Image (cartoon, helix red, strand yellow):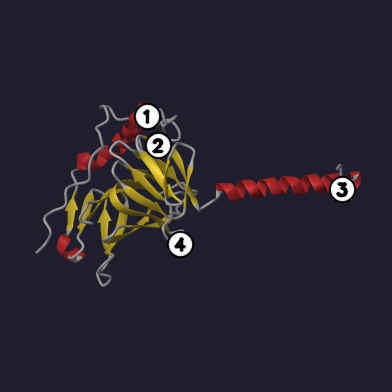
């Protein structure tokens, strides 16, 4: 029905405002992570079933991303932060729906996380593993979890704070650029100690991640992957050498303290 002439202007203005509001709400949706690129054997557990995951789909709060031997997924959240899930990993997006600070829980495998630091107001997020709670502000770092639930945090840029999840009395330990920390289920963080990461590995890891994702996307036919010229991973640049399967792995944890 055509509205009366005297109400056309007000009706049109209301419609425009409604569309703008709907668009801004969708753009700021903190309950989903958008899949920018994916390939290989990668799925999401939804309603107790495995669903194949592809580019431009979304993963909701509490859903688990599962990757196989050749699977990967690169996802972004509304504040510009992003994360890469590598092969043989189990990662839950925002397991705790009541806290938007809780970005992911990684139970097995490896992820790389990019937390944006825009305009001096970095996003604050927490990452959980079976043995660690990692607090971050504007940084790039890797987290690996093995079958024994040992966590290794390796920082490429910025600094993160790590505390023991199973021993809450443990103090938070900062891990800075070029450093790594292993967290064991039965040892305080003070005994584990912070280790230096080889400078070449830390500097080259970001670049090789982009090459790895690009190669996997082409092989899997998953659509356009991020590029260094636009829409790429934060801080990435083309690597001069071919990608290595699995990128640069996080450093091996030292022997568990006695």
Whether residue 181 appears in this view of the structure is yes
Of the numbered discs in the image, which one, if any, rests on residue 201? none
CA gap between label 4 and label 2 equals 26 Å
Residue 99: x, y in percent?
A: 45, 62
Q: Residue at label 2?
A: 38
Whether 166 is drawn above or below 85: the answer is below
Task: Provide the residue designation for mark 3.
Answer: 7
Q: Are marks 3 and 2 in contact (CB under 8 Å)?
A: no
Mark 3 residue crowding within 10 angstroms, few (<14) / some (14–19) / many (20+): few
Residue lying farthest to the bottom in this orientation: 169
Q: Image check: 5 left or right of 169?
A: right
Question: Viewer-nearest of labels 4 and 3?
Answer: 4
The residue positioned 39% from the left and 39% from the top of the image is 233
User: Residue at position x 31%, y 42% from top?
Assistant: 86
Choose mark 3 or mark 2, whichever is in front: 2
Mark 4 residue crowding within 10 angstroms, few (<14) / some (14–19) / many (20+) = few
Look at mark 4 in the image and give the residue it sits on.
99
């Amino acid at each position: 029905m055509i509205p009366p002439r005297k109400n056309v202007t007000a009706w049109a203005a209301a419609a425009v405002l409604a569309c703008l509001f709907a668009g801004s709400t969708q753009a700021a949706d903190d309950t989903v992570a958008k899949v920018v690129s994916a390939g290989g054997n990668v799925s999401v557990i939804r309603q107790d079933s495995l669903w194949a995951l592809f580019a431009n789909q979304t993963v909701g709060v509490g859903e688990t991303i599962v990757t196989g031997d050749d699977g990967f997924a690169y996802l972004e959240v509304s504040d510009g932060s992003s994360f890469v899930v590598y092969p043989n990993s189990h990662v839950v997006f925002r397991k705790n729906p009541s806290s938007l600070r809780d970005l992911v829980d990684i139970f097995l495998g490896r992820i790389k996380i990019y937390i944006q630091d825009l305009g001096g107001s970095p996003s604050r997020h927490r990452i959980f593993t079976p043995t660690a709670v990692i607090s971050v502000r504007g940084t790039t770092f890797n987290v690996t979890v093995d079958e024994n639930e040992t966590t290794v945090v390796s920082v490429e840029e910025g600094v993160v704070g790590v505390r023991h999840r199973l021993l809450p009395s443990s103090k938070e330990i900062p891990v800075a650029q070029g450093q790594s920390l292993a967290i064991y289920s039965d040892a305080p963080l003070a005994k584990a100690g912070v280790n230096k990461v080889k400078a070449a590995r830390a500097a080259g890891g970001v670049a090789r991640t982009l090459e790895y994702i690009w190669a996997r996307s082409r092989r899997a036919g998953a659509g356009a992957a991020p590029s260094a010229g636009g829409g790429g991973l934060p801080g990435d640049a083309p690597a001069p050498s071919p990608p290595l399967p699995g990128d640069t792995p996080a450093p091996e944890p030292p022997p568990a303290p006695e």
